[in-house]
Every structure is written in structure tokens, then in C-alpha cells.
Image (cartoon, rainbow, N blue to C red):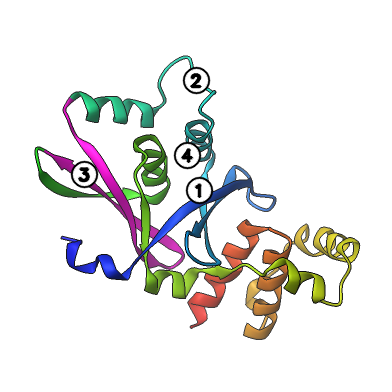
Amino acid sequence: MYEDRYMSLVRLTIKGISYSQTQSGAYALVLSEMDGTRTLPIIIGAFEAQSIAIALEKEIRPPRPLTHDLFKSFAERFHIDVKQIIIHKLVDGVFFSSLICEKDGVEETIDTRTSDAIALAVRFQAPIFTYENILDKAGIYLKSEEEIISEDHTEDEIEIESEIEFTSTVSFSDLSIDELEEQLNEAVNNEDYELAAKIRDEISKRS
């Protein structure tokens, strides 16, 4: 199904997971393209964040299998392999994903939440992809260290601004596109990817 579209796919890797300072119980899962500088922040729930973190930390073994561990055991018992996951659609800030599975040489595509897809991809060591147009729309460019240093702010000033700016509740509807772009750059500079994702979604809604 996806074979004729592989050329437009971009491979991603997990950059990290950060706790949301503005949304209780939420986390920002940050994916980054392997051959570029764009990142894709995705808001996920606490359970999924914990599941992904545990899978990444090989030394952590829960006393009983988590739901995603159970899925992996079930799939392996019946000789089903997860070949890859594809984040294939973005609608109103919500990402839609698919599991590409294979059994006895037959490939099947299964719809899934993106957070579940990532949790399974880590366990099956399956590659994560998205389409170029999704990264064009929702990706955030990371500035290089040289670009950050060349700006007219010291590290201390940036840290102070971060504490003031991002602990307050901002009504995005009151801000212009230019102001949103400026706050998006500040959020990325301060590695506040959860806030960056929210600002990016607001910009996308107005596009």
C-alpha cells in the first residue's frame, strides 16, 4: 500500500520526552529527522510516555508486562512482525499513524494512535517515518549552537526570560502570526517543545 510512496517518507528518531509544565498529566514526545534539523513535537499521555521511556531504558523491567509489552508478546506468539510505523496525517493538531505489519509474507496496515505506535516501534525496533508534507507543516527547525550564541542574549538572560514567559498562561488568540513565530523560536531555543507544539498548532490553524 505504501510501497510507491516510500520516496516521500522521512525517517525519524526519538529525541526525548519532557514533562508538560502547562498541561497536567501530559508529556511532549519529541521526534527528530535522522538526516536533518527538524523536530516533530507530539503531545502524549502519561501512560504512553511511561511506556515509551521504559522501553528505551533497557535495564528497567516492570514486574508485570505493560499493555504494549503484551501486544508484542501476542504478536510474536502468532508470528506477526511490526515492520515500521508511519505518521501519515495531521488534522487540527492531532497526528494519525499506521502500523505496517507482516505475517507469512502478507503485509497489513493497521490504524493506531501515534503514541501507541511509537511505544510499539521501540519494542519491535521498527523504523518510524512521516511524510515530507507533514514535516513541512508541523516540523520545527532546531537552531545550531552557533546561531544561538550569535543572538543578542546571554544564556542567563534566556533562562530568566524562559521562567517569565513560559510559566504564564498565554492566550494565543490575542497574538499575531509574527508574535507567534517569535514565541515559537523562543520556545525552541529553550527546548520547551511542549509549548512549541501548541504554538505550532495555533499557527497551522491560521494557515
Callout 1 amino acid: Ile
Q: Residue at the spot x=53%, y=36% of the render? A: 53
Q: Residue at the spot x=60%, y=69% of the render? A: 199
Magenta stretch bounds:
78-103
Q: Position of residue 131 (x, y in %)?
A: 35, 67
Residue 44 got which mark? 1
Q: Position of residue 178 (x, y in %)?
A: 66, 85
Which structural element holds mark 1?
Answer: strand
In the image, residue 22 sits, relative to residue 145, either above or below, namely: above
Within 10 Å of the Cα at label 1, are there few (<14), some (14-19), or many (20+) other Cα atoms? many
Q: Position of residue 124 (x, y in %)?
A: 34, 37
The residue at which mark 4 appears reads as 48
Q: CA distance from mark 4 to mark 1?
A: 7 Å
Magenta stretch: dominant SS? strand
Query: Is residue 19 found left or right of 47 in the rendered image?
Result: right
Q: CA distance from mark 3 to mark 1?
A: 23 Å
- Which residue extends farthest top? 63
Q: Earlier in the sequence, mark 4 or mark 3?
A: 4
* In the foreground, 161 or 147: 147
Callout 3 amino acid: Cys
The residue at which mark 2 appears reads as 61
Q: Quadrant of residue 97?
A: bottom left
The magenta stretch spans residue 117: no
Q: CA distance from mark 3 to mark 2?
A: 25 Å
In the image, residue 9 sits, relative to residue 98, either above or below, namely: below
Callout 2 amino acid: Arg
